[in-house]
Amino acid sequence: MTIEFWQETAELKRKNVAAQVPKEWMLERVPTPEEEPNAYEYLKKCLPKEENDIADLTIIELAQEIARGTFSSLQVTTIFCRRAALLHQLTNCCSEIFFARALDRAKELDQYFAQNDKVIGPLHGIPISLKDQVNLEGIDSAIGYVSLVNKPIKRAQISNIANILDDLGAVLYVKTTTPVAMMSAETVSNIYGSTLNSCNRKVSCGGSSGGEGALVGARASLLGLGTDIGGSVRIPSGFQGLYGLRGSSNRLPYCNIRNSMANQPLVCSVVGPMATDIEDLKLFTKLVIDSKPWLKDPKCPPIPWREFKVSEKLSFGFIDVSVYSYIHPPIKRALKMVKERLLKEGHEIIQFEPPISFPQMAELWHRIVCADGGREISEECRRSGEPIREEILVANDDGSVSKEACITEFWDDAGLQYKYQQEFDQYWLSTSSMTKTGRPVDGLLLPLSAVTSYKIGDCKNFFSLFFTQAFNLLDYTVVTTPVTKADRDVDLIETQYQPLNKLDELSYKYYDPELFHGTPVGIQAVAPRYEEERAIHLSQTISKVLNS
């Protein structure tokens, strides 16, 4: 590849992906975001009711119907391939499309079912989507780099979690877009351009698992795999009304998942499900853990599934993040709804005062994750000649990259991270003296972001990752939980607000009730390290009180 032809390589890749969509699934005209802001609602208009009804089932319900023989794997796979094809035209969410391979797999599953009168596994015939990082044989894992286009993965490089999904009976059919190196809260690259929010196509889908968020957000997948090093599962999940799990380091197997800064050991990227239903997310997580991934991935801790149960009502610690930034009205309303409903059902909420500020933790996160000064990204971009995009976190405003740390600086930051973890853990334990239960708070509640979302290209103006990066640094377990949607008639501009500083003023002035109308709003439910079962229970509890 010569430096003059990176644009041509990217264009050919886009055309190749588009060519995988059957002609009969091509839209005659793609409506503008203003004409059809909600892609899910648009698909309801385009597709037959029986197909929409199947897409509206949960995975648990769909798996039961497949096991009864009500639906065939081929029927279900065809429906979700078609939805993905249409949604890709609306949001630009797919990095790889392999429908023919998926349909062949579905036929094999149907043949097995016909011969054995039973399913091959608990996810028999269930289409599962994958973030571009997940390696599949014969398919690229370009992770936004032009230099990695047309370099298909070999059999020995297949991700462990992909093999687990195959054993469980899942059907893999698409991979989804990421920003370059997964280092942005907006999903954009020089290969694919920008991915749009499927619930509000006028704004960003978030990142870096933004393609996955868009796909699952319109139910063109019921569950997909994302990754998270600073909020990359949680932000797209929140922006598209999904449940998303950020587990602790390597609780779910990361072996052979392509990554940037892959061997940076302090703040690990983790893989996690993004789902339309909390029970589906729980089922998936339990199935992966029950497969004993530690037998094939030495980084996985040998921790079996442990159901979280308490006989009493839960106690939550609420973190007030308004001291750092103006919080958009829909997010304030979502927090108020959750607090009021939990209290009404007899749960307890106390104020939780973090012993380390979020900006402090975010600063340390950035020094650790960007410790190579952007060297890896710079070198990979140099191979193709593509420019480093300004949305990438290691890029400065002048196009330069961050300063590279020396080894002693990195060691010092490792020590500071450990100190922060100890201080935060100790404060959490100390809340036993503040709760009615006499035990430390069961979980924490706080927003994902200060802003409802942002326009394409604006993500670097809002360092709202403060509220997600901290828990990567601490290695706590978090489940994003959908609460409500922005409503222009309810979430009005607060005319009397006095900004704290220039960044706060930017966030305040950015709120636009019309622009954000209909955008989902979620919150973070946080549990201690390696307590995925508890984090899921917290989310279940919140969802239950919201729906009661």
Image (cartoon, helix red, strand yellow):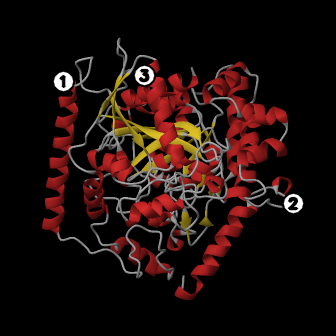
**Could you tell me if residue 117 is visible in this image?**
yes
Q: Which mark is residue 28?
A: 2
> Which quadrant would residue 127 be assigned to in this image?
top right
Q: Secondary structure at mark 3?
A: helix
Q: Nearer the viewer, residue 174 or 513?
A: 513
Residue at 70% over, 38% down: 106
Q: Earlier in the sequence, mark 1 or mark 3?
A: 3
Label of residue 433 in the image: 1
Quarter of the figure that contains the N terminus: bottom right
Q: Earlier in the sequence, mark 1 or mark 2?
A: 2
Of the residues shown, which amino acid type is indicated by label 1? Answer: Ser
- Would you call the spot at circle 3 few (<14 residues within 10 Å), some (14-19), or many (20 or more)? few
Which one is earlier in the sequence, the residue at label 3 or at label 2? 2
Q: 65 or 371, which lies in front?
A: 371
Classify mark 1: residues with Cα within 10 Å, few (<14), some (14-19) or many (20+).
few
The answer to whether residue 74 is left or right of residue 141 is: right
Q: Which residue of the protein is positioned furthest toward the front in this rendering?
A: 496
